[in-house]
């Protein structure tokens, strides 16, 4: 009877892991394996903390131990014999536990994760961001066995630790120090799989409560270019979370907003966790209706298609409905609908006033730049920060209801640098090259001048991302003192009304 109860509890413990689907594993072990017992006996002396963390995990209660996760086939590129003289430990293992390994029990979760942008994080290796750390900020002074010609320490310690890198295995089976340790979300593992489950489910406890904490996401989603954790902290959601941490029931297996907690949402609540109508989903893009990463916001299915991800077949309306389902756990329909009107308005404002025109101007200016290399000119940095830092902050701030980030860290910075730095530098380029003796330079200057004139006089045609309709870039006329008379009069009326209501004076 006791044996049957033990087997039942082990099975129940496995099922408590979120949405487990067992494909390669038919049933949980009845007891700890000899290999795991040998691991534990040794690591109690060498790294007791690891054993204690594992002892608090659901893996422990399901009799899933060290060997079950770290076992390897002899032919695996990163396999090695650890402590060959130890009883029960003379079998090949690997240091890295990859998503492929986790899929032995968590098949569904790994399939979702592999379909997400998270798993593609390693693609940064070929991006502008990595060029900055590799060339502009870095050098080749860090030499390792896998990188005999050197690698940039800025890349190793910065980019790769969040985005991931290819983990290089050396001839003796050890891992190159430039690529390990690494828990980057898009890490390319020796077995060919992408990602790192421990990026969110920190080893060796793999606590679901920790994965649900907003700070867990803040390791990567923070800073000047994507300050989600800072925006969340400012928002009403973040304020409610801080005030009610003890009421969040983070460690519950079933964690449904409105049922198991109602104090506040976390990142996981909105982007991954179950609702009364949805299961947990490890593809964090399935509830996002705008991709605000590029210079111009686009619909997420567009970028999924470019990456060859299955999300290419899931339109933004479907994803938005999934997010609305989360929102209505606590908010009424009108609240949710009105929020999206506000959010879409901010995206359209940024795209049409700054995104489309700014990108067109930058492309037109390239032939006139002194140095034909990215980030070798001041204008490269100006435009990069307008969209990559400030423009993202304005858009991300609106998406998460963080008004200060939307305005002062976002829209204000975009406007200040667009009008105060970007346009003046473009005008200088035009002036320097408009009468140049080189025909190509002169033609490029004329083209840039024509586009700038169109932008500043509201004749620049943009395509509305949401409707696909042609629109004119609006809002720049004031810069040339050409504000529409009706708009100017309306602005004066609003100012006078403000003074009557509050007294005193205000700036025009």
Image: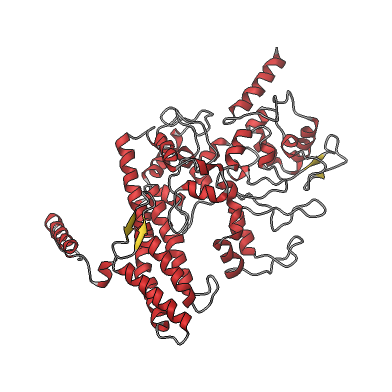
Residue farthest to the right, as pictured: 85
**Which quarter of the rendering shows the N terminus?**
top right
Residue at the extreme top = 1
- The answer to whether residue 128 is above or below residue 377 is above
Front in this rendered view, residue 502 or 190: 190
Whether 170 is drawn above or below 91: the answer is below
Q: Is residue 404 visible?
A: no
Image coords of residue 303 (percent x, y): 51, 50
Left or right, 44 with reference to 253: right
Of 485 and 201, the residue lying toward us: 485
Seen in the picture, residue 324 relative to 178 is either above or below; the reply is above
Which x, y percent locates residue 53?
Answer: 65, 38
Of the pair 104 and 158, the residue shown nearer to us = 104
Quarter residue 27 falls in: top right
Q: Position of residue 272 (x, y in %)?
A: 50, 38
Residue at image point 26% right, 72% down? 480
User: Going by the image, does 75 lie left or right of 184?
Assistant: right
Residue 13 picture quarter: top right
Residue 374 lies in quadrant: bottom right
Outermost residue, bottom side? 437
Could you tell whether 85 is left or right of 496 in the image?
A: right
* Position of residue 231 measured from the top left corner of the image (x, y, whole percent): 41, 50
Q: Quarter of the image containing the C terminus?
A: bottom left
Asked if residue 95 shows in the view, the reply is yes
């Amino acid at each position: 009877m006791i044996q049957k109860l033990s087997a039942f509890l082990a099975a129940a413990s496995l099922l408590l892991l979120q949405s487990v689907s067992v494909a390669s594993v038919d049933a949980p072990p009845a007891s700890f394996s000899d290999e795991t017992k040998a691991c534990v006996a040794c690591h109690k002396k060498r790294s007791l903390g690891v054993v204690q963390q594992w002892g608090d995990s659901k893996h422990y209660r399901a009799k899933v131990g060290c060997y079950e996760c770290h076992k390897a086939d002899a032919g695996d590129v990163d396999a090695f014999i650890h402590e060959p003289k130890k009883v029960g430990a003379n079998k090949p293992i690997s240091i890295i536990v990859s998503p492929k390994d986790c899929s032995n029990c968590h098949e569904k979760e790994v399939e979702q994760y592999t379909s997400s942008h998270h798993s593609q994080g390693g693609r940064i290796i070929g991006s502008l961001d990595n060029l900055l750390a590799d060339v502009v900020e870095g050098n080749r002074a860090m030499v390792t066995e896998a990188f005999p010609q050197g690698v940039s320490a800025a890349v190793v310690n910065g980019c790769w630790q969040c985005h991931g890198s290819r983990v290089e295995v050396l001839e003796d089976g050890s891992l190159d120090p430039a690529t390990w340790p690494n828990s980057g979300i898009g890490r390319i593992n020796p077995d060919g799989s992408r990602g790192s489950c421990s990026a969110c489910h920190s080893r060796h406890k793999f606590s679901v409560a920790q994965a649900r904490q907003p700070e867990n996401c803040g390791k990567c989603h923070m800073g000047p270019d994507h300050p989600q954790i800072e925006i969340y902290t400012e928002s009403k959601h973040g304020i409610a979370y801080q005030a009610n941490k003890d009421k969040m029931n983070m460690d519950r297996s079933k964690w449904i907003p409105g049922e198991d907690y109602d104090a506040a949402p976390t990142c996981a609540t909105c982007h991954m966790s179950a609702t009364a109508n949805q299961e947990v989903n490890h593809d964090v893009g399935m509830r996002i209706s705008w991709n605000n990463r590029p210079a111009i916001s686009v619909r997420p299915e567009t970028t999924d298609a470019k990456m060859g991800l299955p999300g290419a077949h899931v339109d933004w309306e479907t994803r938005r409905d999934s997010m609305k389902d989360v929102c209505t756990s606590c908010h009424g329909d009108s609240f949710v609908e009105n929020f999206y009107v506000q959010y879409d308005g901010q995206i359209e404002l940024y795209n049409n006033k700054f995104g489309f025109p700014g990108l067109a101007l930058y492309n037109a200016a390239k032939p006139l730049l002194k140095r034909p290399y990215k980030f070798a000119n001041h204008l490269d940095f100006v435009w990069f920060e307008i969209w990559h830092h400030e423009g993202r902050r304005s858009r991300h701030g609106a998406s998460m209801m963080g008004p200060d980030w939307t305005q002062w860290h976002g829209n204000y910075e975009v406007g200040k640098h667009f009008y105060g730095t970007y346009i003046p530098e473009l005008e200088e380029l035009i002036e320097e090259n408009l009468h140049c003796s080189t025909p190509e330079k002169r033609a490029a200057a004329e083209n840039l001048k024509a586009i700038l004139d169109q932008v500043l006089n509201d004749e620049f045609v943009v395509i509305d991302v949401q409707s696909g309709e042609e629109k004119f870039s609006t809002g720049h006329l004031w810069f040339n003192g050409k504000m529409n008379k009706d708009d100017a009069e309306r602005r004066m009326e609003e100012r006078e009304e403000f003074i009557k209501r509050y007294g005193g004076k205000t700036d025009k």
